[in-house]
Amino acid sequence: MNSRAQAHVQKVHCRRESPSSLPLIFLCLLHTAALLLPPSVQAPQVPQSLSPLLYFFFPSRKQKPRSMGRLAPLSEVPINGEEDSTNSSKKGRGLTWRNWIKTHLSLVFNKKSDLRILLSVLGCPLFPIPLHPKQSIINEVSSSAQYIIQHFTAATGCRKLEGMVKSIFATGKVTMAMLDELGSGGSAAGANGVSQKGCFVMWQMVPDKWLIELVVGGHKVVAGSDGSVAWRHTPWLGAHTARGGVRPLRRALQGLDPLAIAAVFSSAQHLGEKRISGVDCFALQLSADQADLAERGDKTAEMIKHVIYGYFSQRSGLLVYLEDSYLTRIQSPGAQPMYWETTMSTRIEDYRTVEGVMIAHAGHSSVIITRFGDNLKSGPTVTRMEETWAIDDVAFNVPGLSIDCFIPPTEVKRDYPEDDLATLFRTSSSTYFFTSSTANKSEDPVRPEPPPIRVSLTESAGRGVFATRRIGAGDLIHTARPLVAHPLLSTTHSVCYFCLRKLKATSQTQAIQFCSNECEEQSMGFYNVERRANWSDYDNYCRMHGLKYPLLVKRLACMVISGVAAADSFDILQPESLSPVMVSEMEEGFNLLRGAFTKANICDEQVAFLTKTWYTSVLARIRINAFRVELAGGLYEDLLTSAAASVEAEAAVGNAVYMLPSFYNHDCDPNAHILWIENADARLKVLRDVEAGEELRICYIDASMDRDARQTLLSQGFGFQCNCFRCSSGD
């Protein structure tokens, strides 16, 4: 079996209601009941004077599909097996409203309801102002606001990215908590301070396509936009469109996307100066227009205003504080109006340089929700919650990311006009993030089958690859070209120096060769740099110590110098945790690599990236993400129709690092397999039928070994203990 490394991200490691809040909670329960009752049960009449929280967190049944397939392998709500069997036995004759209340009453008064509110409010909020494609960084100063934004663009250095950055990737950690609820007297009605920890992954394609997956407390919220519609999926509501059209993700404008920040605030109003947390700031204001507000309301709920304030440091020019507030009026015929005001404030800090651009890496958000109106006899009630967040990784221009990654769930797509569907799916197959050999060729070419897989967060192993539809045994899932590949020292003169294809025996010489003109042309960039240097000392160092991964570092360095790759190309991959001893052992290889470029008279500016930190960081990622390329013999068609596990590799010819295959997790009894037919292009194939939502896993090692040998190899080579079903059962 082939060796590869596991791509890790950080593991995803009541409130009490005052008496005055109980009627509202009961209304919440009634509305939830209306959404969750089986069709055979008559839903109770829900009063129309519901709060905006009910209105926004619980869309009407007409707008939500009846059922939603599971989009992630995370638990949705606690399931009581006894209750489940009882409920199923009553399906034939239906449930009474009294039985349903008795079964689900506990959901309102436990911490899960707090978690739902936290995820609904803090998880994936949208910015109040849409980001139109025509908005860009201003070049001329005609107002105080534009002067402030020019100061911001200069401070962040984001102007250099305009027109160059097509996509952004970020991962981070969050900690959320419901603090307390204050009554009219200002005393805390209940304060539990229970915090929930989690993590998120965000993908964004300029200007208006984005996708975020947030996992907190075992629950997963997914939200996205394909440029035509914004949507959200929660375990308790399923998938539904977001009111108010396509708008940016607020989390991206918390210092993660300086280009978008500069674009939206370039048309803001300058309010003056204000001191925030000891920092003198310029204050800019944006307000949602009436058309957008009307689109976000209905006959019962009216959005009165939604304003946002950005505070930019006078000294540094950076965005240090973001505050938005919206007021909603709820009134049904014959009832007194009730008002809900929600204010979210975010402190933005820890700016660091990423590819020459200042990006915020930490912050703290707090939310205050105030309920008031004549029908609240006890007076206004205030609910507070907070979030602390930190960014782990940020990367620009993610290789292979395409619009297919932002296709909404099927339930949301049903509401699309046909013309919008054609626009959404019309794309070049060469730009697909995932390619599949199982697409139905007879279907409309304008609307191809959705990609069969997607990368999502798992509860225990970080990122993973999941099937988006059923994939039959023997189907080819997708192919992947390497980010970087290099032959073994023993095969350098017997395989293509670019794609690792075996050369004919008659053409084997002691010179570097390529299998085709195409491979030679594609390698000219890095190869012209590489052949300027003498690599005998570096190769002898690798040969003497039995090392192969430093060869990949050498090739990547040549690619960076030639301009065909970025120095941070591997930053998206999870690195191995290196001990001080391991870092010290890498120093000799770094000195030899840097020395070879110096002796080749390559200018210092071109190798400025090549520091010891860069060398060890890249090597740490290669060590647990590289694959050993073993070319399999036989015809391609024969291999695709045979059991992939029975394919015998003729010989290892080199090593390679890939993007998507690095996200596959390990299993000693895998349902997928990676193979190489004639070159370094990886092909991933399903070994048995895989259902939609099931995680696809490969085996990193030789699965024929006994359990103890497998555990030792995985622990020493990949740094984790396998808990798959086969290992857990002692097989």
Image (spheres, rainbow, N blue to C red):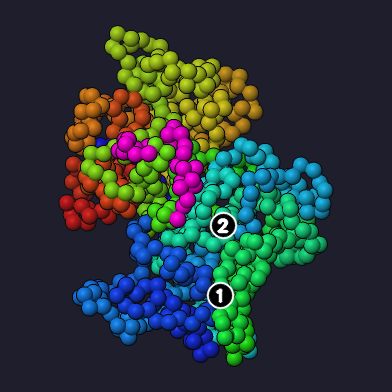
Rendered location of residue 550, percent (x, y): 44, 31
**Which one is in front, 683 or 266?**
266
Q: Please name the residue that numbered disc 2 is placed on.
A: 245
Residue 321 disc label? none
- Secondary structure beneath dot 1 equals loop
Residue at 54 percent of width and 39 percent of height? 397
Q: Is residue 575 in sight in this rendering?
A: no
Q: Main secondary structure of the magenta part?
A: loop
Gap in Å between the C-alphas at discs 2 and 1? Answer: 19 Å
Residue name at image x 42 percent, y 34 percent: 429
The numbered mark at residue 300 is: 1
Residue 418 can be seen in this image: yes
Amino acid residing under circle 2? Gly
Residue type for callout 1:
Thr
Where residue 279 sits: x, y (%)? 75, 62
**x and y percentages locating residue 105 in the rendered image:** 37, 82
The front one of 224 and 513 is: 224
> Is 294 drawn above or below residue 719 in the view shown?
below
Residue 423 included in the magenta stretch of the image: yes
- Whether 294 is drawn above or below 539: the answer is below
Q: Is residue 307 above or below residue 257?
A: below
Q: Earlier in the sequence, mark 2 or mark 1?
A: 2
- Pinpoint residue 192: horizontal percent, then vertical percent: 50, 79
Does residue 32 appear to the left or right of 637 in the view shown? right
Name above or below for residue 428 compared with residue 19. above
At 46% from the left and 43% from the top, the residue drawn is 422
Q: What count of labels does the image hold?
A: 2
The magenta-colored residue range is 415-444
